[in-house]
Amino acid sequence: MKKLSKKTLNKSFRNWYYGHLTCFSQEHMQTFGYLCAMLPIIEELYDTKEEQKEALETYKAFFNTEPQLGTVIVGVTVGLEEAKANGEGVTGDTINGLRAGLMGPIAGIGDSLVVGVLIPLLLGIALGLSTGGSPVGAIFYIIAWNLIVTLGMRMLYFKGYEFGGKAVEFLTGDKAMALRESIMMLGSMVIGAVAASWVSVNTVFKMINAETGEAFLDLNAQINSVLPKGLTAAFVLFCWYMIAKKKMSPIKVMLLLVVIAFVGVLIGFFDPQLAY
């Protein structure tokens, strides 16, 4: 029976705590930080280089979430990797499916709690303490933020690890597929909501009556009357199609969007002030 040592778990947590944004890019996001966190785990659980290489393949897939609350995902997968190494019916696909399914919901919750609640709350207190130019506010914020984040992330990591081992019976039983599909559906809903909130694509294309000078067709308004933010939805689906179906890298898709925006401005389809 293989059991991860406290030293290895602490090292894995430190790697995630300090390195979750290691080699961060739009194409990989937190993938390499995740790999760095899992490296000491894999090295202790598997003896040969071939086994270690095969195990690390699971964590090469794209990953991005809210890094503080997302620590729980790392802890859960550490527990599941330990169960996998002990032959308890967990596979790399199971771990990666759960990991991919959780990152969306955790990101939505984490952004709301950390960015939308915790940071404004601490900054509000810090600003009150900074009245008259006092440095107490800045000192308070630095200490309070680092203390809360460090203790919170550590607790989430080890709670996730503890849950990861106990989750085996749920993830390998008859309800495993339903559980994974439910999590992935929730993640899709969060991603859809984020896309609708933060992505905005509009057109300025209009057809003008030559005699009256009035527009008798406003394409943007017409599309929105049929489907609100319809053009935005079309662009999001287009990006998904190019990445998921055509296997185009995110960087190439972004370059393609730049070209589309440039051509759209030249032909008067997009507003140049909104396109750049």
Image: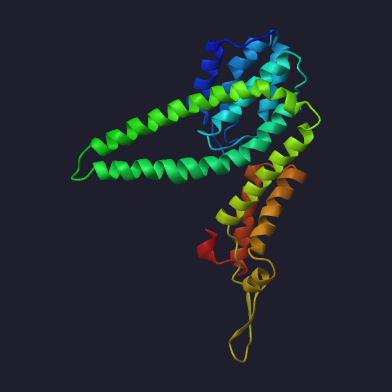
Indicate the quadrant where residue 151 lies.
top left
Note whether residue 246 is visible: no
Q: Is residue 164 left or right of residue 153?
A: right
Depth check, front residue: 33 or 154? 154
Q: Is residue 134 left or right of residue 3?
A: left
- Identify the residue at image location x=77%, y=31%: 176
Q: Position of residue 111 (x, y in %)?
A: 51, 43
User: For the view shown, which residue lies furthest in the bottom direction?
Assistant: 211
The image quadrant of residue 26 is top right
Tell me residue 251's x, y (percent): 62, 43
In the drawing, does residue 140 fall left or right of residue 38? left
Question: Measured along the vertical axis of the image, is residue 140 above or below residue 220?
Answer: above
- Determine if residue 242 is in view: yes
Image quarter of the N terminus: top right
Question: 182 or 141: which is nearer to us?
Answer: 182
Residue 201, picture quadrant = bottom right
* Residue beneath the point at 70% across and 8% down: 48
Q: Residue 3: x percent and y percent?
A: 64, 10
Give the residue at the far left of this rendering: 132
Name the one closer to the observer, 224 or 108: 108
User: Relative to residue 231, is residue 121 depicted above or below?
Assistant: above
Q: Residue at x 66, y 63 (%)?
A: 231
| On screen, residue 190 above or below 138 | below
Residue plotted at (68% across, 46% down): 188
